[in-house]
Image: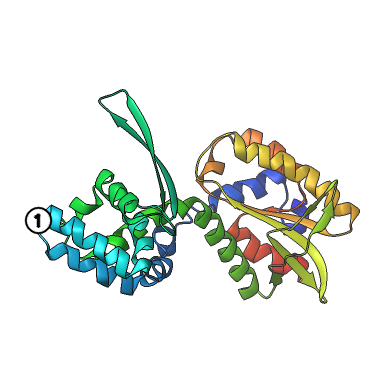
Amino acid sequence: MKYKEFGYKSEAAYFDNFYKTLLDSNRTAKFFVDWEKVHKNAQKFIDEIALLNGLINIENVKLRRKHLGEILKKYPATRSVLPLIIATRDQKIDMLKIRNGKNISYLHVDFYKGTIPEILEFCDETQIVELFGKIKDLYSYITGVEVGSDTNARKNRSGTIFESLVMNSLRHAGIDARKTNKKFQLGGRLKSPDIVIFKNNKEFAIIEVNFFNELGSKPLETAQSYINLQNDAKKIKVKFIWITDGPAWKTGKVERNKAFAQIDYVFNLKLATTLIPRIFK
């Protein structure tokens, strides 16, 4: 750890400031729901949803089922909406059916090429036909399904949000930080860094970015892998920088200090935006 370059008298002093300036969370408003994505997905089928929406006004289940079949026959594009109702984008579904606890069969449904009776049977089994009698608007329902499905992307979005935050902060501080698809030969593999710093329009440093909310083995495993990555970076004459943050680093400081000490440049977001411009600009 090159703490002297940062103006600190000791590693302990640097680490003390590192821990004091950690972020408690990286959850911006965009972390929770990507509304642009939600509305875009729902809007794709706005016409088909409007056609199916008429089923809501049919109280009799048998008549509703019959009318659904007529819609599917007259407007084949409406088929693609049905899987969305049960929160899947699969257009080919194999569904296991069990009767009386022992009779096992399979329903194979292809929403592109399957027969209408097969699709209607699927809608019976999954209670889609019944659902139309319990909701007030299909578009609002599917928007809600999209919101629920979007929460599954939060884990990936968390890393992307922090990486974007780092990139924008460095640029705001006057650093030529870029996202590039170039792969660097690091050890025995090719790797695309999260961010690359350019100096005089030449690659100067590669940056890896991550945020840890919870304590576990992964932070220390990551630290060990980055020690090796730093050694590989030196061989191709670029600097290696690790920007990491999050409440997980507030515990187990002894073990973490040992790992950090072997990497020349370890910053959290706050220190990165103040120290990197001072050293590398």
> From this viewpoint, is residue 147 visible?
no
Image spot of residue 61 (x, y percent): 13, 53
Which residue is at the front of the view, 171 or 137? 137
Residue at 37% x, 55% y: name it. Answer: 115
Q: Is residue 62 above or below residue 97?
A: below
Mark 1 burial class by Cα count in 10 Å: few <14, some 14-19, many 20+: few
In the foreground, 113 or 12: 113
Locate residue 104, reporting x and y percent: 35, 29
In percent of width and height, residue 90 lies at 45, 53
Above or below residue 4? Residue 44 is below
Frontmost residue, 190 versus 270:
190
Direction from residue 101 to residue 163 in the image, left or right:
right
Question: Which residue is located at x 67 percent, y 37 percent?
Answer: 221
The quarter holding residue 218 reads top right
- Residue 2 seen: yes
Give the amino acid type for the residue marked by disc 1 in the picture.
Asn
Position of 157 with respect to 136 (left or right) is right
What residue is pinned by disc 1? Answer: 60
SS of the residue under disc 1? loop
- Colouring rule applied to residues: rainbow
Would residue 59 appear left or right of 273 to someone viewing this image? Answer: left
> Residue drawn 32% across and 56% down?
116
Where does the image place residue 195, in percent across and percent down from the top left? 69, 63
Tell which residue pokes out farthest to the top in this image: 102
The image quadrant of residue 132 is: bottom left
Horizontal side of residue 83 vs 53, given as left or right: right
Closest to the observer: 61 or 267? 61
Work out whether 157 lies above or below 36.
Answer: above
